[in-house]
Image: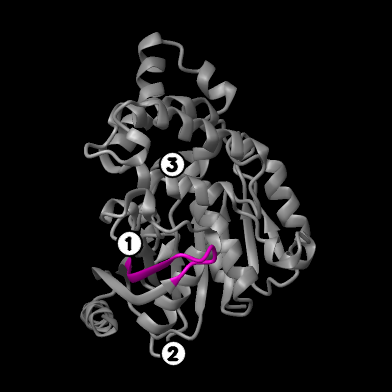
Amino acid sequence: MRRIGRVYFVAGMLLAVGNAWAQEESVYVIPKYTFEAGGVLDNMKVGYVTFGKLNAAKDNAILVIPGASGNRHSSDTLIGPGKALDTDKYFVIGLDPIGGGNSSSPKDGLGTAFPKYNIRDTVRVQHEFITKGLGLAGLYAVAGPSLGSFQGIEWGVTYPGFMKGLILWVPAARSDRQIHAIVDAITAVIALDPEYKGGAYTENPVEGIKRAGMVYFPWLFSEEYLDGLVKDEDFDKAKVAFGEGWAKVWDANSMLTRYAAARTHDVSVPYGGDMRKALARVTAKVLVMPSMTDRTVPISLAREMYRGLPNATWQEIPSIKGHLACCQPPGTAEYAYVSERTKAFLDDLTN
């Protein structure tokens, strides 16, 4: 199976080298992975997509990691010639973390028997893919929003010196009681759906997933944003949209394992709970970009992380769109803010 991973990679690389705006999707396979909690999975799959061209020195690669609900294409609007993740300069790698997309997840057949994993597991798998699958000795940067930023800071702590920069949108170095409460509520609502059957379902419990999205909805935005939905029909449409989106693309057990990993996020665990000791390991320059109105990942957590990092820049997104301020579409003020500051940060890494 190692050979299969290599063959997939070579096909992708041949296309990428030939075209500055190439895109290749593939799957790399790790023959066996042992999780931190002790579980073992054979043939661990890592789904990924690449954009741009790897340079001769192999030092222009940027890894982009999605949030909990996202996949390898979640940041596509930021990728391309002249954009924040400029494919005229960088080789951009989008991937699916454990638990979703084309990577190994409970939906492959194991269901609730899928090994328990955490953020450190997702990063170790990514590191093996980057080093053994892509053959890279380092990265120019690692970027990601929300759960992607959780993995980004874990990259910086676990593999110091491997990347020049970390770009952390709506980030935190640990989960707090607020994040715990959100995840616990989502989990409880899905479990209440009779179709869930303790996780042993044969048909995806879509109604439970939709209602879990409704529970999450008010945490995603600010009070000001919600009050701005003046018409009842606009509010009613907005409050069900997130859950309906989940139900279209997510298997319940796969989604719950992703959010369970977010719930246990804490980079200080291997260091006896000493957060300053953990963050002091980061040698990369770090762009810390929280949303000023975030109610999912409180800005206090971003500030705690920023204060513990040796070389960090603080850029607060001015927006009423809460946790989702980091990931707005082109044409919005938030998109322009994130793009401009991300691009400037990456340019500065060469200095």
Tell me how the rendering is colored: one colour
The amino acid at mark 2 is Ala
Q: Residues within 10 Å of mark 1 (few under 14, many from 20)?
A: many
The amino acid at mark 3 is Gln
Provide the residue span drawn in magenta.
Answer: 34-46
> Label 2 belongs to which residue?
57
Q: Residue at x 40, y 66 (%)?
A: 86
Q: Position of residue 216 (x, y in %)?
A: 48, 30
Q: Judge whether 72 appears above or below 280 on screen.
A: above
N-terminal label among 3 and 2: 2
Q: Residue at x 33, y 55 (%)?
A: 73
Q: Residue at x 62, y 60 (%)?
A: 287
Magenta span contains residue 40: yes
Q: Position of residue 224 (x, y in %)?
A: 58, 22
Q: Residues within 10 Å of mark 3 (few under 14, many from 20)?
A: some
> Label 3 belongs to which residue?
328
Looking at the image, can residue 197 be seen? yes
Distance of label 1 from label 3 (alpha carbons): 25 Å
Q: Residues within 10 Å of mark 2 (few under 14, many from 20)?
A: few
Foreground mark, 1 or 3, reads 1
Q: Secondary structure at mark 3?
A: loop
Residue 237 is marked as none
